[in-house]
Image: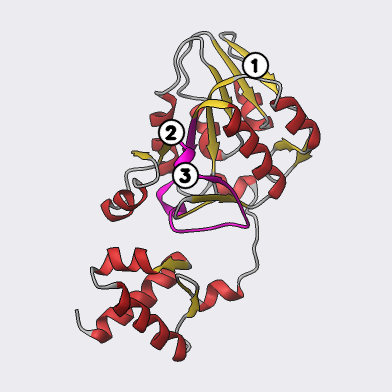
Amino acid sequence: MLKTKRQQAIVALCELHGVVTVKFIQEQLNVSDMTIRRDLDELASQNLLIRVHGGAKSLNFENEKPTELSHGEKKQLHSREKEFIAKKAAEAIHENDTVFLGPGTTIELMTKYLPKKKLRIITNSLPVFNLLTTNDHYDLYLIGGAYRKITGAFVGSIANETIQKLSIQKAFVGVNGIMEEFVSTFSVEEGKFQQLVLDKAQQKFLVADAYKFNQSDFYNFYNLNEIDALYTDDTISEVVKNHYEQYTNIIH
């Protein structure tokens, strides 16, 4: 690939993903890491991107203030992909399981596909709880605490103390970003609670649409190496899938 085309591609990757690592660019463009590092330094000197340790980020990413989308806004994003993930993830749940379902629009969709059999379901999500109250097959437990209206989740010290007293077979947790081995979310309190949930669970599962890969949010709360599987949608590229399978099992 010609240098001009290569550097244009690098800038485009930065604009698309916000933050990119040298390793990720190398896999996308199939060139040496030394060449990429030289390109990044040159592009940074031309003020076309911002050089960071191990990679680069777009100029727009630097200027954006972190914001958290409302529950309604999240429901309208990537709805087909979320439906795909929800159906696939629900297949891992079986009769008599004790399951934790976290907050998030993808996990809310999972409630449609749960087996109509005896289950014990624990959640700190008011929307998830409300969607399940009409089903007599389920023993349903809502974890209380400080209420975050923007996500409909209960968090904080009361929620943290309660979850540590419970046994969980399978936990399903959503994320806002996946960057290398780390998964992140916007809220520190939600992240800390989700960390406790995953630590307690015998089997740990994440759900995230393909747009969450190579993105990061404010608070890193878990490591992909400790996750049993990550459920995503069918738009994930083979390159991204192969890269992240060094950390965990990617199911789509």
Q: Which residue is mark 1?
A: 140
Q: Secondary structure at mark 3?
A: helix
Q: Nearer the viewer, residue 209 or 34?
A: 34
Quadrant location of residue 54? Answer: bottom left
| Numbered tag placed on residue 224 in the rendering | 3
Residue 180, placed above or below residue 163: below
Q: Nearer the viewer, mark 2 or mark 1?
A: 2
Rendered location of residue 248, percent (x, y): 39, 41
Q: Residue furthest left?
A: 1
What's the distance in space between the residues labelled 2 and 1, CA to CA?
24 Å
Residue 105, placed above or below residue 188: above
Is mark 1 in CB contact (under 8 Å) with mark 3?
no
Is mark 3 in CB contact (under 8 Å) with mark 2?
no
Q: Amino acid at mark 1?
A: Leu
Dot 2 surroundings within 10 Å: few (below 14), some, or many (20 or more)? Answer: some
Which tag, 1 or 3, sits closer to the chain's start? 1
Which tag, 2 or 1, sits closer to the chain's start? 1
Q: Nearer the viewer, mark 1 or mark 3?
A: 3
Question: Residue drawn at (27%, 79%), measured in percent from left and top?
Answer: 6
Q: Amino acid at mark 3?
A: Leu
| Numbered tag placed on residue 228 in the rendering | 2
* Residue bounds of the magenta highlight: 204-227
Q: Is residue 159 magenta?
A: no
Which quadrant is the C terminus positioned in?
top left
Question: Residue drawn at (76%, 29%), measured in percent from left and top?
Answer: 161
